[in-house]
Amino acid sequence: MSASTSRVAFAGARLTRGARARGSRRPSPGRPLATRSSAAALDEAAPPTPSCFVDHCGVFAAREGAPGGPLSGLTFSAKDNLDVAGVRTGCGSPRWLETSGSTPASSNAAAVEAMLDAGATLVGKTHMDELAWALTGENAHYGTPPNPAAPGRVPGGSSSGAAASVASGACDVALGTDTAGSVRVPASYCGVFGFRPSTGAVSNDGCVPLAASFDVVGCFAKDAATLEKAGNVLLGTNDGEEDETTRRLLRVRGSSERGEGSSDPTSDAASRMLGVPPARRTAPLRVGRAEPSRPETKGAPPTGLSRCVVAADAFEACEPATRAALFDLLRRAGTSDHPTVKTMFASERVAEARLGGTTTANGAALFRRRASVSGEEDEDPETTVAVPPLSEWWSSFRVAQSREVWAAHGAWVRSSGALDSFGPGVRDRFAAASATDDDAAAAAESTLDAIAARLETLLDDGVVLLLPTAPGPAPKPASESSGTKKEAEAYRNAQLRLTTAAGCAGAPQVTIPAARADGMPVGLSLVAARGADRELLALTRELCEGNGGLMALREETGGM
C-alpha cells in the first residue's frame, strides 16, 4: 500500500489578522483540503503511528497538492520548524509555542509551498528535538517518536518525526532541516534515504533558524528515485537567488567589512556572529535546473561526478560492526555488473584520503593554501592555515554554531525565561552558548575556513567522498540506557565528527540505507562539491536502481 493511502490528520488553526509571517511567501490559506470524495482512501486506511506528528493545533484535513505536478500522487510531512499557513509553528518547545509560535503562520515556508505546487499532498507536521538542537529525537516535553526500523531505539534527530513518518510508511517524503546532521543522522538510524543540500541551494524562508549559516532544508524518502524528485523540487526554490537569510548575512558581512552600519533590523544579532558569516557557506550559489533523463547514457555516472574517495579517518571513527558492514558493501560493489556501480566503485577508481591533517608537535596539521576566505588570491603564497585531525573538527564547529544559535535566540531565551523550560542537554547547550568567548569564536571560524578549503580541494574534479553517516546504529533511549551522561555525550561527539564536514564546506550530502550492523540500519554517505546537488541526487538514484545496484547488494546480505 502506498503511503499516499495512509490517513493522517494534523494540527491546524484558522488564520487571524495578526498571524505572523516569516519570509516572503504568498499567503495560501486557500490551499485545497482533502474532501471525503477525494480522500476516501485516506480516511479509510489504518491511522499511522500518531507520535510522529504534532497535535498542538487541533485536527486539520490533509492539504492536496496542485494537480499534474512531478510529485502528484505522493504525500509528505513537514518538520514543526517549517511554517504551514494557518497552523502554529512549535519547534519542539512548549515555551516557543506559547510565545513566538502563539499565532498561526500566514504563509507556507518556501519548501512547503514548493512541494504543494509540485503536486504532493501535505499530511502532517512532525515532532522534532527542542529548537532543533539535539540529535537523538528524545524530546523531554513531547516524547520520542518510534523508530520503525529499530524498535526500542531512538529515531535520531532533530528531524525525528520526519524520518519516522517515512520509515513507518505514513508518507512518501518528509521535509526536515539539517544544521549539524539533523536529516542525515535520523535517516541513518531509521533506514531511509536522506538529502542535505548545499548551503544556500534551498530557500530557508519560513523556517525557524538554529544557526543560520549552517541551516539547510532537506528531505527524506524511502527510495532514491523519490528522493531525487523531491530534492529537485526543493532545489527549485532558489533558482540561483539567495533566500532572505543569505541576503541578510551577505548584507551584514559587507557592511562589517566596510566598517559601516546596516539598515537591516537584524544586523545587531548577526554582528554577534562575528559580523562576517563565512563566504564558504553564504556565497551566492546556483545549482542549475533539473535535467531530463539521460537514456542514451544509462548506467554512466552523471556528468561531473566520476570517481570515489574513501574518507579513511571517518571510517576509523566508526564502531567495528558498522565499519565492517559498510566496507563489505563497498567490496561487493567493486565487483558488481551494474554499469554505474562498477564504474564508480571499481578498485582502480577508488582512492583513499584523510579528511583531517596529520598531527604535528603543536597539535594541529598545516594545510597550505593561497585562497583567502573571500576567494581572492593571498598576497603571500606561503600563507598556511591549521587543519586539525578529524577528531578535533567538532570542537570548532560547536563554538561557531553556538555563537550563531545565541545570536538567533538569545534575546528570546532571556525575555521568555525559556532556559529553565528546556529539557536536559538542550538547556546545557543554550547555557554554554550564552557564554561563548569572542576570541574562541574567531579562532573557530578560522579553523572552519581551513577545513572548508581542505574539503574543496578533496571534492574537486568530480570526486564523490564516501563516509559513514553515523558511527553506529541507533542507540537506546537515555531512559533505557545503562550508560552515563558522559558516555552519551561522548557518543554525540563521535556522531558530530562525521557530520561536520558537509556543514563546514556547505556541500551536499546524501545518506543511503546501505547496510545493517547488529541487526539495525546504518547509512553510507556520499558528499559532492558545493553546487553539485542535482548530479549527486541523480548518481544516487543510478547507483541504487536495478540488479547489482546498491539496494540489490544490500538485500543479498539480509536486507533492511
Image: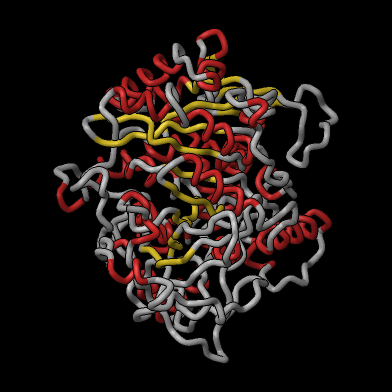
Percent position of residue 6, x then y: 33, 62
- Image height of 116 relative to 195, above or below: below
Image position of 425 (left or right of 444): left
Q: Residue drawn at (47%, 33%), measured in percent from left and top?
A: 525
The residue nearer to you, when weighing 548 against 201, is 548
| Residue 347 visible here | yes
At 69% from the left and 23% from the top, the residue drawn is 461
**Type of colouring:** secondary structure
Q: In which quarter of the image is residue 468?
A: top left
Residue at the extreme front of the image, as rendered: 37
Q: In this view, does 404 lie to the left or right of 25?
A: left
Is residue 2 positioned above or below 357 on the image? below
**289 vs 521: above or below:** below
Q: Position of residue 89 (x, y in %)?
A: 46, 73
Q: Looking at the picture, does residue 213 appear above or below residue 384?
A: below
Residue at image location 58% in from the left, 40% down from the top: 508
Which sits in the foreground, 228 or 277?
228
Residue at coordinates 38% horizontally, 27% vertically from top-left? Answer: 552
Which quarter of the figure is the C terminus placed in? top left
- Spot occupied by residue 404 in the image (x, y as percentages of width and height): 56, 57
Residue 43 percent across, percent down from the top left: 31, 71
Residue 140 in sight here: no
Front residue (pair 66, 448): 66
Quadrant of residue 455 within the rendered picture: top right
